[in-house]
Image (tube, helix red, strand yellow):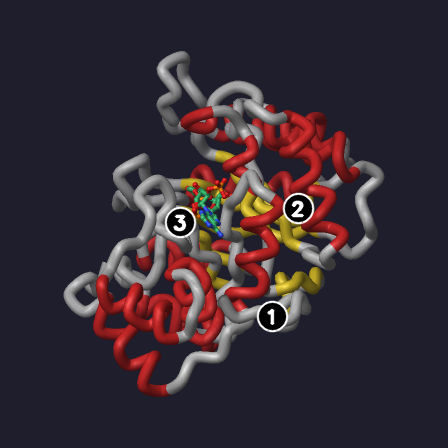
Amino acid sequence: MSTPSLTLPGGTWPLGDLAVTRFGYGAMRLAGPWVMGPPTDREGALAVLREAADLGITHIDTSDAYGPRVTNELIREALHPYPEALHIVTKVGATRDEQGGWPPARRPEELRRQVHDNLRSLRLDVLDVVNLRLGDAEGPRPGSLAEAFGALVELQRAGLIRQLGVSNATEEQVAEARSIAPIVCVQNMYNLAHRHDDTLIDRLAADGVAYVPFFPLGGFTPLQSSALSAVAARLETTPMSVALAWLLRRSPNILLIPGTSSTAHLRENIAGAGLSLSDEDLSKLDDIGVGSTSAN
Ligand SMILES: NC(=O)c1ccc[n+]([C@@H]2O[C@H](COP(=O)([O-])OP(=O)(O)OC[C@H]3O[C@@H](n4cnc5c(N)ncnc54)[C@H](OP(=O)(O)O)[C@@H]3O)[C@@H](O)[C@H]2O)c1
């Protein structure tokens, strides 16, 4: 294995007036199996959060629906009072049912309640960034977001939210949100093998809006590709490291939020994302996503 240094790779990116490290941390994996209930290793979960902050990560992605409430309460316990530079990005628009499903909850009164739930569980007076989560577990779904997004804009005007974003959104919904109020980020599923948002990423980059891929490592189905494994073997590293390094290279507006419940994996991912990839590696990796792109 190569042993690159543990400096956070990628530098920083502005989410509006909030600067965050491009290497962030996705906290969803800290809840129990299938993101329900408490973690199997509570001390281990707290240790991952403290390690992330100690290593200089200033972007943590969460939701009160993780657990539900479990992840936010772990973040509060591990890190409150929060370091000034740390920015917690949360999302609203779905709740949990008893089977672990993610039913949508996007009526204005439901969104107001979720914003207040996040404020309470994170023990904050103002949420730094709130994403409106659209679509469903299968992905984005078409339809106007005006009423739901308008409710969040009102909460922003009331001083409860600093910056807004959207998640699991179609390109049309991103455009509709931007016609109503500025957004600082779009959080959609994207990785080496799932490239539906290629055009959107480039458009957002041109306008200075962050793109935050969820499932950067494949999520519940780890990325598998012989081309990826071949590049990783040649660089004497793991496919996950290569997948993260590729995302950081893909576009300057891409922010990483890989999820892990392990401090060892967190460190491995930071080191891996800092790998330098040659033009030849990049062209082999780019071929993996061929066929997975569409206009969305
Ligand atoms: N907006 C949305 O609708 C939405 C949906 C899903 C996720 N998200 C956000 O996106 C973040 C990232 O997604 P994700 O966590 O589901 O998927 P991911 O980052 O693609 O993958 C996480 C999985 O990879 C494993 N892993 C991480 N680093 C590893 C390493 N170095 N070696 C081996 N295994 C490794 C983790 O297991 P270990 O715990 O064992 O490391 C975990 O099972 C979430 O945490 C959440 O904040 C948002």
Q: From the viewer's perspective, is 164 left or right of 52?
A: left
Badge 3: residue crowd in 10 Å (few <14, some 14–19, many ≥20): many
Looking at the picture, tell me which residue is in the foreground, 63 or 38: 38
Badge 2: residue crowd in 10 Å (few <14, some 14–19, many ≥20): many
Instruction: Tell me which residue sits at (35%, 57%) in the image.
Output: 190
Across and down, in percent, residue 226 comes to: 22, 63
N-terminal of the pair, mark 3 or mark 2, is: 2
Identity, as a three-letter code, of the amino acid under mark 1: Pro
Label 1: which secondary element: loop
Across and down, in percent, residue 26 comes to: 54, 46
Label 3: which secondary element: loop
Q: Which residue is mark 3?
A: 215
Q: Which residue is mark 1?
A: 9
Label 2: which secondary element: strand
Q: Quadrant of the C terminus?
A: bottom left
Identity, as a three-letter code, of the amino acid under mark 2: Ile
Identity, as a three-letter code, of the amino acid under mark 3: Phe
Occupied quadrant, residue 220:
top left
Instruction: Tell me which residue sits at (68%, 50%) in the image.
Output: 52
Q: Is residue 23 above or below residue 155?
A: below
